[in-house]
């Protein structure tokens, strides 16, 4: 029996690979997401301006409010000033 | 990569750390990466698969504009395989090579039975090949990578890939009991 390259490659491609276990598929993505490098730190002044621009009123009654007050104080202004 | 989305667009999104970009990368390429690793590393494939994606996530923001993403993932997987888990995977490979063996379900004809036997022989031959031969066969013959791209993955020249591929095919045919035409008596 003889075989040429194309036929051998065709048989090779037909060799079954084990199916990816669902648990591995989910775990790999979860672990990978945890490794994603964070967005670089923004200067606090820029961040506080973003919070002011985007925060909905409800969101202000939260840790954002504490941070916002802190950020404004550090900028030398009173809250709302 | 098919569709309107190009690797370049996805690379830019990954570099900009856009939400969902990494999930999209995973969605596009996890199946092919798994297929490669399952054939390469047998029961070591799960660990390699996870390690590869974790490394990809850590480095995605450093990609160059012109990076082709699938070869990039193959490169990470290749390096992981070579550096850490290879010996363990090799021990395990023979235990699982038959676990993924072709099903012995009903076949339509003698021709199919014959083909199935050849597939099994090639599968067993593949497991016995040296790592370097198995890798080049999987990348070029199975995954369809050009020699230049496989060369980048394997860290060698295109010429070396072509030569290695030729030797790997001959060796696989021999191990599978399917000698190439130029070897036939």
Image (cartoon, grey):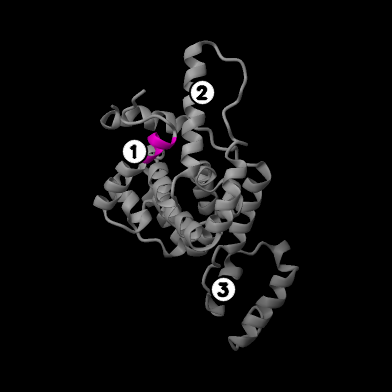
* Mark positioned earlier in the residue sequence (2 or 1): 2
* Label 2 crowd (10 A; few <14 / some 14-19 / many >=20): many
Q: Mark 1 = which residue?
A: B170
From this viewpoint, which residue is outermost toward the bottom?
A76
Mark 2 or 1: in front is 1
Q: State the residue in front, A38 or B56.
A: B56
Q: Which residue is mark 2?
A: B116
**Chain on which label 1 sits:** B
Secondary element type, mark 3: helix
The magenta stretch is B169-175
Please determine if labels 3 and 1 lie on a single subunit: no
List the residue tagged with mark 3. A47
| Residue B62: image location, x then y, percent | 42, 65
Front-lying residue, A9 or B61: A9
Q: Is residue B77 magenta?
A: no
Quadrant in the picture for the C terminus of chain A? bottom right
């Amino acid at each position: 029996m003889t075989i040429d390259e194309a036929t051998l490659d065709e048989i090779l491609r037909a060799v079954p690979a084990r199916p990816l276990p669902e648990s591995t598929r989910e775990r790999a993505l979860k672990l990978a997401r945890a490794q994603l490098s964070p967005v670089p730190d923004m200067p606090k002044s820029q961040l506080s301006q973003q919070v002011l621009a985007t925060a909905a009123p409800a969101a202000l009654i939260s840790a954002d409010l504490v941070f916002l007050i802190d950020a404004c104080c550090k900028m030398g202004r009173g809250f709302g000033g | 990569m098919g569709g309107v989305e190009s690797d370049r667009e996805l690379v830019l999104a990954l570099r900009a750390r856009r939400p969902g970009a990494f999930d999209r990368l995973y969605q596009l390429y996890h199946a092919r990466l798994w297929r490669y690793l399952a054939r390469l590393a047998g029961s070591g494939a799960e660990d390699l698969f996870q390690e590869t994606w974790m490394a990809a996530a850590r480095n995605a923001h450093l990609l160059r504009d012109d990076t082709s993403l699938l070869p990039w993932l193959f490169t990470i997987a290749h390096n992981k395989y070579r550096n850490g888990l290879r010996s363990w995977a090799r021990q395990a490979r023979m235990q699982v090579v038959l676990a993924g063996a072709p099903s012995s379900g009903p076949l339509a004809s003698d021709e199919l039975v014959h083909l199935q036997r050849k597939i099994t022989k090639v599968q067993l031959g593949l497991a016995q090949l040296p790592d370097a031969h198995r890798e080049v066969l999987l990348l070029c013959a199975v995954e369809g990578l050009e020699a230049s791209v496989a060369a980048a993955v394997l860290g060698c020249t295109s010429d070396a890939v072509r030569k290695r591929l030729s030797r790997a095919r001959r060796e696989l045919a021999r191990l599978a009991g399917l000698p190439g035409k130029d070897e036939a008596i």
